Amino acid sequence: MSEATVTSTLDTSGKCCPMPIVETNKAMKSLTIGDVLEIIATDTGTKKDIPSWCDRTGQTLLSMTEENGAIHYCVRKDR
């Protein structure tokens, strides 16, 4: 996983499945190829959901970190 400049941030804290993925999908549609979306989530299910969603949709998961109960993802739009 590599460093990238975040283009946009989506905070889904406090929301449960399926909302983090629904909102991620919607946010990615508004970005252009090469943009990086930072997703902040508190739902531990996103640890499986976000990487799986990236695989299915052809996006690149650049990083996943946890801090103070929040999970931070950086996803690059590739398609």
Image (cartoon, rainbow, N blue to C red):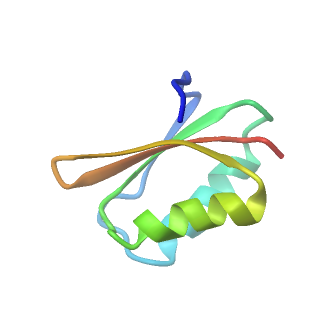
Tell me: 2 left or right of 17: right
Q: Position of residue 64 (x, y in %)?
A: 42, 46
Tell me: 29 left or right of 22: right
Q: Is residue 18 above or below residue 57?
A: below
Residue 7: quarter of image: top right
Q: Position of residue 28 (x, y in %)?
A: 68, 49
Of residues 55 and 21, which is closer to you in this image?
Answer: 55
Q: Is residue 9 above or below residue 12?
A: above
Residue extending farthest front: 1
Q: Position of residue 71 (x, y in %)?
A: 33, 52
**Tally of numbered tags:** 0
Residue extending farthest right: 79
Q: Residue at x 47, y 69 (%)?
A: 48
Q: Is residue 60 above or below residue 69?
A: above
Tell me: 8 left or right of 12: right
Q: Residue at x 58, y 57 (%)?
A: 24
Q: Residue at x 65, y 57 (%)?
A: 54
Residue extending farthest bottom: 17
Q: Position of residue 42 (x, y in %)?
A: 30, 61
Q: Residue at x 78, y 35 (%)?
A: 32
